[in-house]
Image: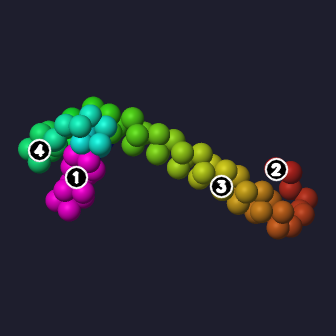
Amino acid sequence: MSDIDFSNEEKDTLVHKLSEYFRDTFDQELGQFDGEFLLDFISKEIGPYYYNRGLYDARGILESRLEVLTEAIYEIEKPTDFIR
């Protein structure tokens, strides 16, 4: 898996959200520099868990849709003398 990379705009937004969280929850200011380090840590160490969970969820949706599609194909199959 490649590293999780955010655009500068995304990174600024995420750091801002972390700063607000620290201020509102812990009554502590989190500077831009510290916020970026915290975001990098979360992205590297915790992000893969969320990423994998998203993949598992997507796989489950895809499998259920594929099952419906497979059933639809069997429904339009024409009878023949061949046995499957």
Label 4: state its secondary structure: loop
Query: Residue 31 — which label?
Result: 4
Residue placed at 22% from the left, 52% from the top? 16
Confirm whether the magenta stretch covers residue 3: no
Query: Residue 84 — which label?
Result: 2
User: In the image, residue 18 lies at what x, y percent?
Assistant: 25, 45
Say if mark 3 contacts mark 4, CB within 8 Å.
no
Give the CA separation, mark 1 to mark 2: 60 Å
Question: Could you tell whether 78 is left or right of 62 in the image?
Answer: right
> Disc 2 or disc 4, which is closer to the eye?
4
Give the CA separation, mark 1 to mark 3: 40 Å
Q: In terms of depth relative to the viewer, which is nearer, 22 or 33?
A: 22
Query: Label 3 belongs to which residue?
Result: 66
Query: Label 1 belongs to which residue?
Result: 16
Q: Is residue 39 above or below residue 69?
A: above
Dot 2 amino acid type: Arg
- The magenta-colored residue range is 7-20
Disc 3 crowd rating (10 Å Cα; few below 14, some 14-19, many 20+) is few
Dot 3 amino acid type: Leu
Residue placed at 59% from the left, 45% from the top? 60
